[in-house]
């Protein structure tokens, strides 16, 4: 007979959504159990955000050293011979970062007195699941249930994962660099990884079905990234679909919108055509929760259609981002503890860690227009920002762009593209959360010399004058 445990809160999935929900439940004195079948930290910590940023960091170092090894060196620094990269060692270092954070999550859960059960949960009804652990089967019933089972990479039926066809998970743990990498899908994951591998010296080609890279953003915002790709010899095939591997498995068959067919040889084929919610394999069907397309349907408190069953994170849809999952997790814990909360953020900012980086918060100009708003758009180029010049952050045409209401100057959105702009995301999100107007941004004294000065300058332009352009 399986051991049967009752708990106040049962959380399934220990990614950013589930583990944050568990910590907050514990802090609020709720008896909480968290079930995780793989490693605590989920996609983000184990095979997503953190590992990718570690590899991107190393790739940046390597690229800088390569430039110093070229004839004449760079900025007065030269290397007598080109650097070498041992990817297996890079991956080992990345694993130490992952292990440290995984240990940190374990410690935080322990401190919050959360009981963690290691194993895969299968639900038999809305409130009860069984978990096969290494010590035997456990049955758990929760008064409240939080589903946080996350997402998986989308697999193309004609390009199944295995062998030379890899997902982001395998790409982040390769033991050696491929000579030639073909990336299918120019979304943020494909571009972040494709650019990192290019910096590491790999020949990279990208295939994208739409008419531009990062198709969810406008052409102005992605232009500097497109320029970088061109300058660094990354061939991008737009309006082109991957159709499968050739019979010998050594090339990708592609088809253009005009019907033209060709083949792209490669050693590895990285498929990054999106992520899908993990809705199968754990008895979701026994719970009769309503769906919203491929995602679990929720209201603004993350409640599903089934009483006392909540769902958060990638499982409930876009934007599939770690910080959204965390915010929903903390909120649901507080709702269960009796607080009045609603998930209605002013924005969920997003960063593409490409070269250069892109930050998006709030509405893009086209989105404001589509929503019928009279929007003003002000753009301040990094070419006119001192700090950007010292960081070479404006190369290829980087900028900060502020979208504001024509009447009153309420900020609708802020975007940036440029080297190292990722850290500006906090100020963008803060401005939107505080309901800032152009005056607020323009008259905040931004520290000199920083990239943040470009935010104040863009806001000044929105008010009708700039000081440094
Ligand atoms: P997940 O992190 O997917 O966690 C779900 C967990 O549930 C998993 O650990 C899984 O093992 C467990 N689980 C599922 N079913 C069961 C079951 N039945 N029993 C027990 N356990 C179960 N987001 C960002 O915000 N910034 C980034 O820079 C970023 N970079 C990314 C890079 C890559 C390469 C990838 C793949 C993703 C990236 N993301 C990024 C997205 C981010 O990883 C996800 O949005 C985030 O992990 C979602 O959190 P979650 O808690 O909803 O689900
Ligand atoms: P996607 O970004 O979905 O990109 C996949 C690309 O593959 C697409 O461009 C598609 O056209 C292409 N493709 C598909 N099939 C083929 C084929 N056979 N051949 C060639 N190309 C193909 N979600 C939103 O809804 N709105 C947002 O604004 C948004 N912004 C985000 C910003 C960031 C920084 C991050 C981290 C996520 C964002 N998301 C957004 C969520 C994101 O769309 C999902 O997490 C997505 O699933 C990311 O995975 P991806 O990069 O693999 O795929």
Image: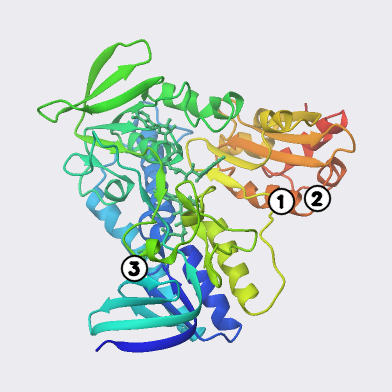
Callout 3: helix, strand or loop? Answer: loop
Cβ atoms at labels 2 and 1 below 8 Å apart: yes
Q: Quadrant of the C terminus?
A: top right
Inter-mark Cα distance, 3 to 1: 32 Å
The residue at the point 62 percent across, 68 percent down is: 331
Q: Nearer the viewer, residue 272 or 98?
A: 272
Q: Is the residue at mark 3 in contact range of ligand 1, meaning its CB lies under 8 Å from it?
A: yes
Note whether residue 414 is visible.
Answer: yes
Q: Which residue is mark 2?
A: 435
Identify which residue, 432 or 178, lies in the foreground: 432
Residue at the (36%, 39%) spot, across then down: 272
Label 3 neighbour load within 10 Å: few <14, some 14-19, many 20+ = some
Q: Using residue 36 as the reference point, say whether residue 160 is left or right of it.
A: left
Give the secondary structure at mark 2. loop
Q: From what the image shows, is residue 324 above or below residue 249?
A: below
Percent x, y for residue 287?
43, 66
Q: Which residue is mark 1?
A: 346
| Quadrant of the image occupied by residue 181 | top left
- Quarter holding the N terminus is bottom left
């Amino acid at each position: 007979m399986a051991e049967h445990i009752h708990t106040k809160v049962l959380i399934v999935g220990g990614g950013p959504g589930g583990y944050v929900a568990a910590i907050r439940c514990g802090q609020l004195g709720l008896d909480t159990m968290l079930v995780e079948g793989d490693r605590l930290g989920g996609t983000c910590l184990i095979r997503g955000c953190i590992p990718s940023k570690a590899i991107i960091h190393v790739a940046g170092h390597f690229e800088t050293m390569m430039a110093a090894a070229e004839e004449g060196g760079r900025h007065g620094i030269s290397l007598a011979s080109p650097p070498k990269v041992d990817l297996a060692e890079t991956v080992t270092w990345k694993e130490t970062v992952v292990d440290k954070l995984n240990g940190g999550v374990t410690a935080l859960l322990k401190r919050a007195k959360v009981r963690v059960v290691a194993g895969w949960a299968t639900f038999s009804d809305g409130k009860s699941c069984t978990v096969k652990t290494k010590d035997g089967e456990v049955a758990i019933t929760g008064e409240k249930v939080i589903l946080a089972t996350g997402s998986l990479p989308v697999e193309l039926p004609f390009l199944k994962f295995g062998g030379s066809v890899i997902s982001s998970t395998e790409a982040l743990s390769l033991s050696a660099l491929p000579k030639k990498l073909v990336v299918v899908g120019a979304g943020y994951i494909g571009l972040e990884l494709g650019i990192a591998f290019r910096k590491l010296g790999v020949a990279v080609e990208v295939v994208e079905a739409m008419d531009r890279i990062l198709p969810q953003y406008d052409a102005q915002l992605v232009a500097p990234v497109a320029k970088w790709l061109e300058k660094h010899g990354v061939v991008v095939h737009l309006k082109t679909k991957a159709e499968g591997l050739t019979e010998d498995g050594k090339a990708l068959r592609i088809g253009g919108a005009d019907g033209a067919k060709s083949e792209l040889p490669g050693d590895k084929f990285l498929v990054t055509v999106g992520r899908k919610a993990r809705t199968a394999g754990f008895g979701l069907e026994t719970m009769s929760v309503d769906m919203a397309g491929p995602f679990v349907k929720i209201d603004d408190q993350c409640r599903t259609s089934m009483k006392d069953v909540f769902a958060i994170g990638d499982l409930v849809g876009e934007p599939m981002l770690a910080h959204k999952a965390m915010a929903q997790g903390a909120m649901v814990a507080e709702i269960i503890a009796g607080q009045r909360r609603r998930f209605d953020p002013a924005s969920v900012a997003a960063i593409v860690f490409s070269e250069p980086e892109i930050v998006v918060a709030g509405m893009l100009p086209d989105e404001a227009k589509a929503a019928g708003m009279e929007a003003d758009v002000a753009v301040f180029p990094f070419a006119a920002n001192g700090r950007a010049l010292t960081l070479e952050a404006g190369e290829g045409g980087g900028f900060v762009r502020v979208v504001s209401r024509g009447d009153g100057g309420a900020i609708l959105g802020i975007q940036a593209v440029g080297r190292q702009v990722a850290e500006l995301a906090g100020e963008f999100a803060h401005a939107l959360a505080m309901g800032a107007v152009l005056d607020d941004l323009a008259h905040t004294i931004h520290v000199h010399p920083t990239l943040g000065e470009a935010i104040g300058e863009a806001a000044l332009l929105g008010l009708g004058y700039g000081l440094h352009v």
